[in-house]
Image (tube, rainbow, N blue to C red):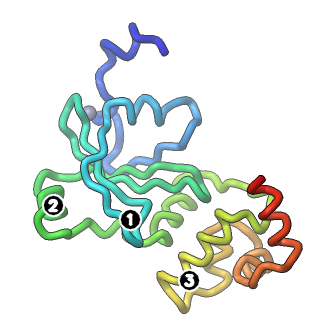
């Protein structure tokens, strides 16, 4: 947009804490942070939210978890060169963002909960299913806590969809 600003602005890496929460959209902080970042490693597979980017200006490497389902945050964890190398050479990732549960716990403690209007939103349903896949004995209380919803709503997320739910999903898909 404003070329004058972005041309001489330095990157945000030094101003961020070692574990940073960057909300999507708000105050355009995400644009300022991500404008100099380029993804270099994608975790993929079951950890679809996880990747590594480096900064084109200062070469800082970040492990990034992207939660666009529940709290709409990026979580950035500063990596040492040796940690990046361990990921590349041995597939050894730092532990912080390895489950979606861990990512959501960061969302709970470091940002404010998002309120869904639709208690059966596809994002909530898939996230509840992911949490249960990662840890089959996770309780409904824990799922409700992680998603910042009530326990009955959490229970409904894990029930098979009713015909009405399916119809609504179909309508919303357009
Ligand atoms: Zn930088």
Residue at the extreme top: 4
Q: Position of residue 156 (x, y in %)?
A: 78, 79
Q: CA distance from mark 3 to mark 1?
A: 17 Å
Give the residue drawn at x 55%, y 53%: 68
Q: Which callout, 3 or 1, points at the residue further toward the start of the chain?
A: 1
Q: How many marks?
A: 3
In the rendering, which numbered label is found on residue 83? none
Circle 1: is it few (<14), some (14-19), or many (20+) Cα within 10 Å? many
What's the residue at 47%, 36% (across, down)? 30
The numbered dot on residue 88 is 2
C-alpha gap between disc 1 and disc 2: 17 Å
Check disc 1 and report the residue beneath it: 97
Q: Earlier in the sequence, mark 1 or mark 2?
A: 2
Kindly identify the residue that appears in the image at 29 percent across and 52 percent down.
52
Q: Is residue 7 above or below residue 55?
A: above
- The residue where tag 3 is placed is 132
Cβ of mark 2 under 8 Å from ligand 1: the answer is no
Q: Quadrant of residue 117?
A: bottom right
Q: In the image, which is nearer the foreground, mark 1 or mark 2?
A: 2
Are the residues tagged 3 and 1 within 8 Å (C-beta)?
A: no
SS at mark 2 in the image: helix
82 relative to 134, above or below: above
Q: Position of residue 28 (x, y in %)?
A: 53, 30
Q: Horizontal placement of 168 versus 62: left or right?
A: right
- Relative height, residue 35 to residue 144 (above, below): above
Q: Secondary structure at mark 3?
A: helix
Q: Disc 3, ligand 1: is the CB inside 8 Å?
A: no
Along the viewing direction, whichever of 124 and 113 lies nearer the viewer: 124
Q: Residues within 10 Å of mark 2 (few under 14, many from 20)?
A: few
Residue 115: quadrant of the picture? bottom right
Q: State how far apart marks 3 and 2 are (Cα).
A: 29 Å
Q: What's the residue at 31%, 69% (across, down)? A: 95
């Amino acid at each position: 947009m404003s070329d004058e600003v972005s041309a001489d602005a330095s990157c945000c890496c030094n101003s961020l804490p070692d574990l940073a929460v960057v909300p999507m959209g708000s105050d355009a902080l995400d644009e300022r942070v991500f404008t100099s970042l380029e993804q270099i490693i994608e975790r993929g597979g079951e950890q679809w939210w996880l990747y590594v980017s480096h900064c084109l200006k200062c070469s800082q490497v970040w492990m990034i978890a992207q939660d666009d389902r529940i709290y709409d945050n990026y979580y950035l964890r500063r990596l040492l060169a040796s940690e990046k190398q361990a990921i590349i050479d041995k597939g050894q990732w730092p532990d912080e963002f390895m489950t979606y549960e861990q990512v959501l716990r960061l969302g709970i403690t470091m940002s404010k909960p998002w309120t869904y209007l639709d208690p059966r939103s596809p994002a909530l349903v898939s996230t509840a299913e992911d949490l249960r896949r990662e840890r089959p004995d996770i309780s409904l209380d824990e799922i409700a806590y992680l998603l910042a919803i009530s326990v009955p709503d959490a229970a409904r997320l894990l029930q098979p969809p009713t015909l009405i739910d399916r119809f609504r999903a179909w309508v919303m898909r357009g």
